[in-house]
Amino acid sequence: MIDYNLNKFKVVMLLITTLGMFYSCDDFTEELPESEVAPESFYSNNAELESALIGAYDGIQVAYSQFALNTGEFRSDNFQPNGNNASRNSLHNSSLDQGEGYLRWANLYRVIDRVNRIIIAAENVEGADLNIIGEAHAIRAKVYFDIARVWGAAPVFLAPVSTRGEAKRPATPYAEIIQDIVVADMKKAEEYISILQSEFRFSKSGVLALQAEVYMWEKEEQLAKQAIQKLIALGTHSLVQTPQAWQDLFINQPSTAEFPDGPGKIQSGPELIFSIHYELEETTSGVARAYMAGAAISTISEVADLQWSERFPNDSLGWETKYPDTPPVFTQEVVQDDGSIEIEPLYGDWRHFATRNENAFMEDGLGSADPGEARCTKWTKNRSHIDPNDDDTNLTVYRFADMVLLLAEAELKLGNSSETLKLINDVRAARQLPLATEADFGTTFDEQLDFLLVERQLELFGEGKRWWDLVRNNKAIEVMTPILQDRDITPFGEDRIVWPIFIEHLLENDLLMQNSGW
């Protein structure tokens, strides 16, 4: 097991004393390390490479703490504004002020700089550990993929940057980033990494999940299918089979005065392929911000809330009409008029309860909040007196249900709709939910795709997947236009699917141009 504290101490000392890597402000061009040490001399043995790799993962903690949910959730139909927080509302409404700090990409490029040093130095380390090199390539592939799908064209650095002048370069076209860097790096990562499973580091299973994500984004469904089939064949991950096991994948509920039965941080289970790890006593430069999905400035959208109840009705008539042969998982005690207590079914999808009930756990149902007013409580049920800066919730990047449903999408686009329905029902069976019928699924490709995307939405709610699902399937404008019109917001067009570049990046680097539409 990795000693996070020891390794972080080692990498900090290595970077500060050997390389002089000081960062003075928030801009990438102002935060690059100044070093006269040649890249091939950065690290001389596997112990130093390993320490540097831990430093790269530490950088991922900082870079993705808000980026993952900002980019993957808040422009989608999963959440809606709650109040007048201008920064968050600009995300919900896709208005995206070019001066917003969440558009800075400095932290992402710091991670890239760290792994570039590892990749180059490893060429001169005799007997260099291939797993370390492979992980560095996987990290670089993931970060460049996310940069490309957020901003499109962007600057590319494949070697350490030693001076600020080296940071000033034009954007590389999107297609080149994907093919020449992302695809090449993730193939090398698969070749080099032999460790099959390691939740908080890129392993063979994590790399295959990354490949599936990238290939689906690039509409290479056959390659995505092959990657997921390889992942399944590893036998390292499986779907959990009970509501409690599903909740344990996410829950990080401290014990508080309002919620004394809080179980603390669990976040474990066989579905977790790759997560970004946070621990308060070990994380010195940033914590997870998963609380953002449950913060008061956003609520689960009324559209999503009602859609969930439509697919899995919360009333007896609706449920028994739609699913007459399948009782719901939970029951509840109901006080009758005469004071007696009857045990009755608790209708609805228990994942819905777990995701939006602010007061207790899923066996207590939806809670009292009306549609559009409930916070997302998938990770923490009660946040009273919990400082958001003390949130050490791990961020799930890839888990097995995501891959199963992504395989379902690949199969659908390859013309295998019956296999798609089977995979949907594999997940539903594991969740002890009623199986979808052919009538539910629909008969046309568009009906079946829409059905599948809702299945992904409900299973992966709040995990930073929904916006990318919509964009990948050319559904973002279709889904968001009526929602934005209801808010009296002008809907966005195709030229605003990509995000604007932070205005200060443009001022610092006159070789960059703002993305079209912004």
Image (tube, rainbow, N blue to C red):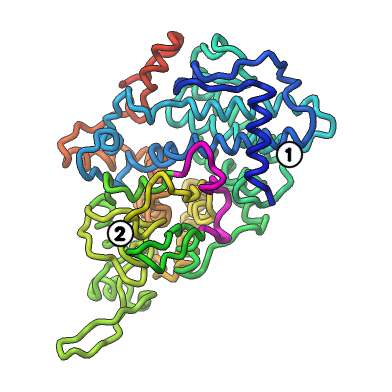
Q: Residue at x 39, y 70 (%)?
A: 434
Q: In the rendered structure, does residue 278 fall within the stretch colored magenta?
A: yes
Within-10-Å neighbours for mark 1: few <14, some 14–19, many 20+: some
Q: Which residue type does callout 1 highlight?
A: Tyr
Of residues 265 and 219, the one nearer the viewer is: 265
- Residue 308: percent from the left, percent from the top? 30, 59
Q: CA distance from mark 2 to mark 1?
A: 42 Å
Within-10-Å neighbours for mark 2: few <14, some 14–19, many 20+: many
- Residue 425: percent from the left, percent from the top? 46, 64
Residue under label 1: 192
Q: Residue 115's image quarter?
A: top right
Of residues 31 and 350, the one nearer the viewer is: 31
Q: Secondary structure at mark 2?
A: helix
The answer to whether 376 is drawn above or below residue 49 in the figure is below
First to last magenta residue range: 267-288
Q: Secondary structure at mark 1?
A: helix
Q: Residue 91's image quarter?
A: top left
Q: Is residue 445 visible?
A: no
- Residue 256: percent from the left, percent from the top? 38, 62
Q: Which residue type does callout 2 highlight?
A: Trp
Residue under label 2: 308
Q: Quadrant of the C terminus?
A: top left
The answer to whether 478 is drawn above or below residue 419 in the figure is above
